[in-house]
Image: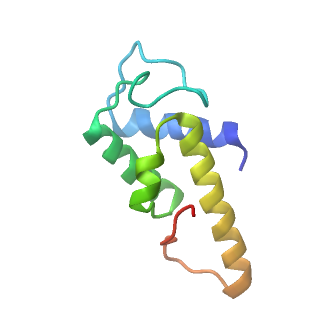
Amino acid sequence: MNGSTVISRLERLANEEIDIAEDAATWSPSVKLVEDLGLDSLKMMTLAVAIEDHFEIILEPADEQRIGSVGTVAELVAVIEEKLSADDGSHGGSDQPAERGVE
C-alpha cells in the first residue's frame, strides 16, 4: 500500500473516530497531529486504537510514542504491514493481529 493511500485511509479514520477541528490543516505527511490537527492525548489514544482495528495490527507502546506526524503514522503502518506480509508468507499467516511494532 502506498503512502498516499495510507494517508487518505488515516484521514477517513480520524474523521470517523475523533472530532478534528474544522480549521485543521489538510492531511499531508508533514502535518503534526498535536500542533496542526489539535489532537490531545485522549484523541491520540482513540486514533491509535482505530488504526490498530482498521489495519489489524497492534502498536507497541514505543510505536505510539513515535507518532507525531501524519507521515510518521503512514510509515509505521506501512512497515508493520510489510512485516505482516513477510510473516504470512513464511508460516501460513494468522487471523490474529500482529503483536509487534517497528524495531
Numbered circles on residues, count: 0
Residue 14: percent from left, percent from top: 43, 36
Question: Horizontally, is 92 left or right of 101 in the view?
Answer: right
Instruction: Name the residue rendered at 42%, 32% in the picture.
Output: 15
Residue farthest toward the bottom in the current orientation of the protein:
91
Q: Is residue 29 above or below residue 9?
A: above
Instruction: Name the residue rendered at 59%, 27% in the picture.
Output: 30
Which residue is at the front of the view, 55 or 29? 29
Residue 101: percent from left, percent from top: 52, 64
Residue 55: percent from left, percent from top: 53, 57
Residue 93: percent from left, percent from top: 63, 80
Question: Horizontally, is 59 left or right of 86 in the view?
Answer: left
Q: How is the image coloured?
A: rainbow
Q: Is residue 27 above or below residue 23?
A: below
Q: Quadrant of the C terminus?
A: bottom right
Question: Horizontally, is 4 left or right of 72 in the view?
Answer: right
Instruction: Name the residue rendered at 59%, 37% in the picture.
Output: 71
Which residue is at the front of the view, 80 or 55? 80
Q: Is residue 36 above or below residue 97?
A: above
Residue farthest toward the top in the current orientation of the protein:
23
